[in-house]
Amino acid sequence: MTRSRVEVRTEGLKAMAESAADEALRDSVPLVDEVGRKIEDRIRRKLDRPGPSPPGQPPGREEGHLLRSIGRERAKKFRLTVVTIVGVGAGPEGRRGVERAKAAGVNVYEYADLHEKGGTRQGHRIPPRPFVRTTIAEVEGEVTRMLERGQ
Amino acid sequence: MRADDLLPAVFDLLEGDAAFNAVVAQIWEDTEREYAVPSMAYSILFEVPHVEIHHRIGVQFTPFTRSRDDLITLLGRLYTLLHREVEWTVGSPAQAIQSRFVDRVVPVAVEDGVWSASVEYELITLRQRYAA
């Protein structure tokens, strides 16, 4: 015999690893949900101030369409990740806000994008008044610590 | 190092670049006003001293040019000057910073004969008390 063959079958181990990963992900759903709620609250607080606001600051409340369109999809396990979505038109509340704005003739997605990134109108500059990116930058450290601690 | 201290050094770097300077006449803080062409607006998106010893600054640059080619040249120079994989130094006295491209809005003609785009960079410096 000039050759030997060693074979390690991993089906059992793989299944165990997948099961453990699946359990860990399911356990993290409430935590990710809490992270989403924190981000949503922070965005709402930023927008819930009387407008107009100075350039660089989050847009102030005028008719309130943007504020009412901020919502959150509850955290869900999706394959090997746990996902929550926060922002304009997210979740039932966000969708209701978008519909209400639409009925009033306001495209809240365009309005949000114009403020988040800035834009131009007839030769005039409309500077950015970011409210999502600033929130993410502010909570990133806190959220990372929450996820590391698992609470 | 705060944005007020860092950004003038970054602007000196940009204005010292011949290709950049050939296209852009002025850099101005983004605000509600008529924009000059060619020029470049900047806006501080966030400034967060929250990650250990680092200070994070999000900056958006919005150039306005007369042609798409000028805009592409300008965006290329911004990328070359600011997108670095490793820590580098800027200003005098030299300050160590990290800088990375984060996001962009694609080039479009915002009106007849005026092209614009936005690019966002994150500048990461040492917090003041550690930089001394």
Image (tube, rainbow, N blue to C red):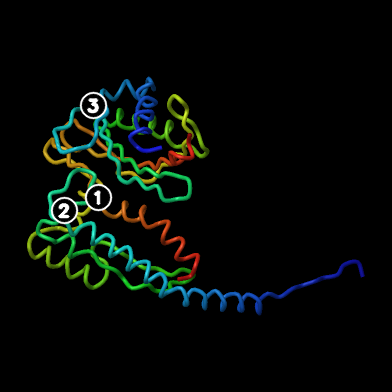
Residue under the image location 33 percent in, 32 percent down: B72
- Disc 3 vs disc 1: which is toward the camera? 1
Q: Amino acid at mark 3?
A: Pro
Q: Badge 2: how crowded within 10 Å, few (<14), some, or many (20+)?
A: some
Residue receiving disc 1 = A116
Q: Badge 3: how crowded within 10 Å, few (<14), some, or many (20+)?
A: many
Say what secondary structure mark 3 lies in. loop
The chain identifier of the residue carrying mark 2 reads A
Q: Badge 1: how crowded within 10 Å, few (<14), some, or many (20+)?
A: many
Choose the circle earlier in sequence order: 1 or 2.
2
Residue receiving disc 2 = A60
Q: Amino acid at mark 1?
A: Glu
User: In the image, residue A55 lies at what x, y percent?
Assistant: 20, 43
Residue receiving disc 3 = B38
Q: CA distance from mark 3 to mark 1?
A: 23 Å
Looking at this view, name the residue that lies furthest to the right. Answer: A1
Would you place residue A28 above or below residue B118 in this image? below
Q: Is residue B99 left or right of residue A92?
A: right
